[in-house]
Amino acid sequence: MEKYEVLYRMRPGALGTMSLVESKTEEEESGAGKKYVVKQVECIDENQANNALREAMVLLKVKHRNICAYKELFIIWDNCISSLFLCLVMHHSDQGDLSGLIKAKRQKCEQIQDWVIQIFLGQMVDVLVYLHKQNIFHRNLKPSNILLDGEASFMLCDFSSETLMTDEMKWKIRVEEAPDQKSWMAPEALKFSFSDKSDIWSVGCILLDMLNCSYLHEEEAISLLGRIKESSHSLENALMCMRQEDTAISAILLLMLQIQPAMRPTAHELVMDQFVKECLILAGSPLIKVKKPLSPEIMEVICKSGIRTVLEFMLTYSDIEEAQEKAIERLHTLVKDAKVNLKRGLEIISSVTCAAKNHIDSLKIQLAACSVLLDIVGRAVRCWLARGQFVAFAQ
């Protein structure tokens, strides 16, 4: 901690103390004075500290636009109390966190705008797909762990390791000190069982909290989060009171807040939901490719162009599914009707393969790409057999 100056102590979390600190070194591009949040978690012994550090090290490699990754991790010894601490250094946001936004809206009995909630859901589903694909679970998702980054942009922070989250004694002590810390945790997580479905429950709870901030006081909202762990009827009744029972977001909440983990969707399964797709589009998620129409004039150019023009066209409009499909079809016609030399053949293979990878969910592109590639390879083999040597293409 020598290179950081503690500015003030923040409210303790469920597992450790938090401090706002200022860098005293010049190693940052922005120089000394940059602010960070340091979380200090007391460890039982050196073995627990090292295990937690190993798990957390994986998070240093996480790269996602909606994830506030750790800057660094280290272990220190506190001589005053003769104890080991794992320190996790996180970036600080001057704009606050989601809990502050919800609290401010609740005090004014104001609703959070629908589009902000949709962008939040889109960004969080995008983040969870990314994390869960790597078998990384957050384990402690709650509004205070989601930083604000602009009017409607959210950054997930403060990941927890399995070693620390399954320390029953430490967890119980912290919960007794601040019982609301467990409000957003899934029912099974309270028994120290964590999975990707635990994160899904937590995001559902945050969504519910964002929806009810104009209806419920803080104590009532916390009480509701406790009741829905016991009975699904509590959630249904709450949605009726908020006049949300027949909306698309209520359907998502009823799925995400299933008491049994097996009944909840995975993050990947949520992507398939039409409402979530709309949220992902609003959030600018790469998980959803928005189909852009081609003008008739461009279509006409494609149908009459030569190989070189078509390849340039594919590079220019690589993100448009229809453009790639029509270009590949045109290439197939050209390859069948004309002799193609080795260099041009390799360029075609590269462009078509790239299009197939970029639009892996498009059956039409996959079929068209296979047809072109099979035709080119077939011609190369026939040339080789006919000449007794490897001449892939002849002009």
Image: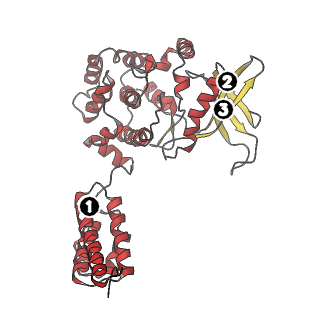
User: Residue tagged by mark 2?
Assistant: 46
Identified at 52% across, 23% down, the residue is 165
Residue 195 position (above or below residue 394): above
Image quadrant of residue 111? Answer: top left
Q: In the image, is 394 to the left or to the right of 94?
A: left
What's the coloring here?
A: secondary structure
Say which of marks 1 and 3 sits in front: 1
Q: Using residue 299 as the reference point, say whether residue 185 is left or right of it.
A: right
Picture coordinates of residue 170, whole percent (x, y): 57, 16
Distance between mark 2 and mark 3 Cα atoms: 26 Å
What is the spatial separation of the Cα atoms under label 1 and label 3, in whole angstroms? 52 Å
Marks 1/2: CA–CA distance? 53 Å
Q: Quadrant of the N terminus?
A: top right
Percent x, y of residue 91: 60, 39
Look at mark 1 in the image and give the residue it sits on.
Answer: 366
Question: Residue 51 location, x and y as percent?
Answer: 60, 28
In this picture, is 347 found above or below 121? below
Whether residue 17 appears in this view of the structure is: no
| Amino acid at circle 2 | Glu
Pointers 1 and 2 in contact (C-beta within 8 Å): no
Work out whether residue 216 can be spotted. yes
Circle 1: element type: helix
Q: Which residue is mark 3?
A: 20
- Of labels 1 and 3, earlier in sequence is 3
Q: Residues within 10 Å of mark 3 (few under 14, many from 20)?
A: many
The amino acid on which the numbered mark 1 sits, given as a three-letter code, is Gln
Residue type at the position of mark 3 = Leu
Q: Which of these two is toward me, 202 or 55?
A: 55
In the rendered structure, the answer to whether residue 276 lies left or right of residue 126 reads left
The residue sitting at 31% across, 56% down in the picture is 360
Other residues around mark 1 within 10 Å, as few (<14) / some (14–19) / many (≥20) = some
Q: Nearer the viewer, residue 9 or 345?
A: 345
